[in-house]
Each structure stands twice: as C-alpha cells, then as structure tokens.
Image (cartoon, helix red, strand yellow):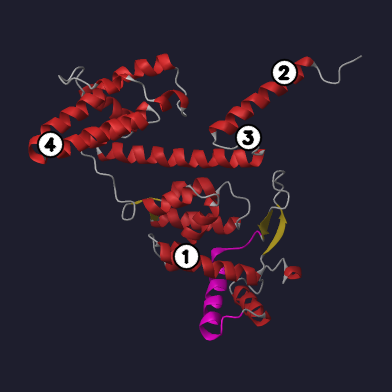
C-alpha cells in the first residue's frame, strides 16, 4: 500500500516537534502551552535580552568604550593571571546553572571556562582584602559570603563576571528613575512593526521625537520593552511628548494623556474592529484606522474630551460623540474620518 506521507516528511515533522518542545522548555512554558503562548514568551525573552545588552553598552560607554565586548576584554587583560590569593575549595565546583541553565554548557566546557572566572574572583577577593582595614572584618566577611553566594547561584559566567567587574572598578549603576536615554530608536523598532496604529500619526510622532530629541527614563524604558503592548505604550509616550510640547514626559503625564486619548478615540470612531487573524487566539481583534488620522486630529479630539469633562458631569453621551466629531472635522477641512458609525 502506498504511504500517505513519505518517511522523510515524517522525520522532518518529528525533528520540528522535538525542536519546538525544546523551545517551549527554554522559554519557561508548561508542556501544554500552545504555539501562541510560546511565541509570546520568546518575544518577552528577546525584549529582556535587548534591555540587558543596552545596559551593558551604557556601562561600557561610561568607561570610554563603545562596546561591552571591548570594555570586557580590556579589563580582563588587566586582571593578573595569578593574584596571590588562595581560593576557598568551595569554588572548585562549577555552578549547576552553568550546565543546566540557558547557557547550556557541557560540563567540560564549564570547567574550562571556570579557570578564566577564577582570575576575576581573585580580583574581587584582593579588592575586599585591600578595603578590610578601613571597612572592618565583619564587612569583609559579608562581602566574601556575598561573592560566593552570587557565584553559586549564577546562571552563566559572563553575567557573574560583569557583577564582579562593576564591584571592583566601582561602577555605580545609574538610577533608573532619573537617568534619561534616547527614546527614538527603541520606539521606531516597535512602532514600525505595528499594523494596528494610525500610520500617519506614527510617522509624525517619530519625526517629532527625532527632531526634538525625545528621551525616556530607564525605568519607563524597562516598563515598555517588557510589556506585551510595547508599540501601544511607545505611541502613548511619544504622543504625550508631542501634545505637551516636551521631550521628557513623566509617567503621570503619560497616564493622563493615555486616558484622554482612549476616551477620544472611543467617541470619535476613526477605526473599524477586525479579526487579528491569530490562530491561537481566534477571538482576538485589532483596530484598522482611517489612513489619514493625524496627530493634529487626535489632539483636537483629546482637547474636546478634556473640555467636556471639565464642564460636564463626566457621563459620555451622544452629544459628546457629536462634539468630538465636530472638533476633529474643524481641523481637517470638515472631514472627521468616521468609519465606524455602526458601532456608535
């Protein structure tokens, strides 16, 4: 009897299933997680990795290097091959997570890599010894215990050595609440992939952000890049800067503008709701905006909602809908671009 599927096809399917099972495990998903859940977990991991690499670059540049790898290599060259300090025997054992964690080293490779890490550990122990006369024996003992605790719980040697170098070279971490970084490239990467945002407004916001040098705190940045709705949050952040004519919007300002925008768009109805075409979430929908929706029109809608809230009792009525539509039309040659009147 002729086979329905060739053996090569079935073997390929088996390899794909094995690969996906491995991906599901590394992404931290349960054995019953579907494709959509695994992909979202992988996306979240990618965002965290991107943020981590950005932090490494910031540390390197604070020491005069363009890339983390250049800084790391330069520091490692300064670390003596054998600082005359005897390592405690507890350091003889490779941390378990080096082999079983995300780095997925073989035991042999991990043991070889550990020899390089010994140089950094000796450097930290020498640092502790130098400061012990000033800081006291109790401080020194706490530091040694902390060093070993971090070593034993480390998931890979690179991350552990980074912590050691930051300590011995007294690199202070920037305060994420007060440290501002460029927002444009981060925002551009997320917004240009989004298909359910008003495209003209996105272009205008990115142009404004680039021209005005819009910045964002590290705390706000971490919040956005770790979010499942990064593109929406970037849109709201840039919109807040645009509407308030600033380049450093605060969290409170973003929250206020976001609430106004949501109410304004719900009343305005410049979009239609369609299926997101996600097989893993068949009920998921997205918005398709009128092509010509601009920031000026969103601004007009937001200002009208703000006026109505200030003058009224906060209960949105059909009269509010008409007022918002009229406000938008007044800045767009009489055309409010309403495309979802059936949903009003």
Whether residue 38 appears in magenta in the rendering, the answer is no
- In the rendered image, which residue does mark 1 sit on? 255
- In the rendered image, which residue does mark 2 sit on? 11
Which-is-in-front pick, marks 4 and 1?
Answer: 4
Q: Residue 28, image x and y in percent?
A: 54, 36
In the picture provided, is 46 more to the left or to the right than 167?
right
Q: Give the spatial CA distance, label 4 vs label 3.
A: 49 Å
Q: Which residues are magenta?
A: 291-315
Q: Residue 40, image x and y in percent?
A: 58, 42
Looking at the rendering, which quadrant does residue 203 occupy? Answer: bottom right
Whether residue 169 is visible:
no
In the picture provided, is 244 more to the left or to the right than 63?
right
Please give the label number shown on residue 137: 4
Main SS of the magenta part reads: helix
Q: Give the spatial CA distance, label 4 vs label 1.
A: 49 Å
Q: Give the spatial CA distance, label 3 vs label 1.
A: 38 Å
Q: Earlier in the sequence, mark 4 or mark 3?
A: 3
């Amino acid at each position: 009897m002729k086979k329905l599927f060739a053996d090569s096809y079935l073997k390929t399917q088996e390899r794909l299933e094995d690969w996906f099972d491995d991906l599901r495990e590394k992404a931290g998903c349960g054995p019953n997680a579907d494709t959509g859940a695994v992909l979202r977990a992988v996306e979240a991991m990618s965002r965290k990795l991107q943020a981590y690499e950005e932090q490494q670059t910031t540390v390197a540049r604070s020491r005069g290097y363009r890339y983390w790898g250049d800084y790391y290599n330069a520091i490692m060259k300064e670390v003596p091959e054998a600082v005359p300090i005897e390592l405690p025997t507890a350091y003889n054992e490779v941390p378990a997570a080096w082999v079983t964690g995300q780095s997925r080293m073989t035991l042999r490779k991990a043991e070889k890599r550990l020899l390089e890490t010994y140089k950094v550990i000796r450097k930290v122990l020498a640092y502790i010894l130098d400061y012990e006369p000033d800081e006291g024996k109790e401080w020194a003992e706490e530091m040694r215990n902390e060093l070993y605790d971090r070593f034993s719980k480390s998931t890979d040697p690179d991350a552990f050595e980074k912590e050691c170098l930051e300590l011995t070279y007294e690199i202070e971490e920037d305060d994420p609440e007060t440290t501002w970084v460029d927002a444009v490239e981060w925002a551009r990467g997320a917004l240009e992939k989004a298909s359910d945002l008003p495209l003209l407004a996105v272009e205008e916001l990115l142009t404004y952000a680039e021209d005005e040098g819009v910045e964002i705190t590290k705390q706000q940045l971490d919040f956005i890049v770790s979010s499942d709705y990064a593109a929406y949050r970037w849109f709201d952040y840039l919109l807040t800067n645009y509407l308030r004519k600033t380049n450093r919007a605060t969290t409170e300002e973003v929250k206020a503008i976001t609430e106004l925008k949501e109410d304004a768009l719900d009343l305005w109805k410049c979009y239609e709701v369609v299926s997101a075409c996600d097989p893993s979430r068949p009920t998921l929908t997205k918005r398709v905006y009128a092509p010509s929706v601009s920031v000026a029109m969103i601004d007009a809608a937001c200002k009208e909602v703000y006026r109505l809230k200030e003058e009224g009792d906060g209960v949105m009525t059909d009269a509010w809908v008409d007022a918002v539509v009229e406000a938008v039309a007044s800045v767009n040659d009489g055309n409010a671009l309403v495309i979802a009147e059936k949903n009003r």
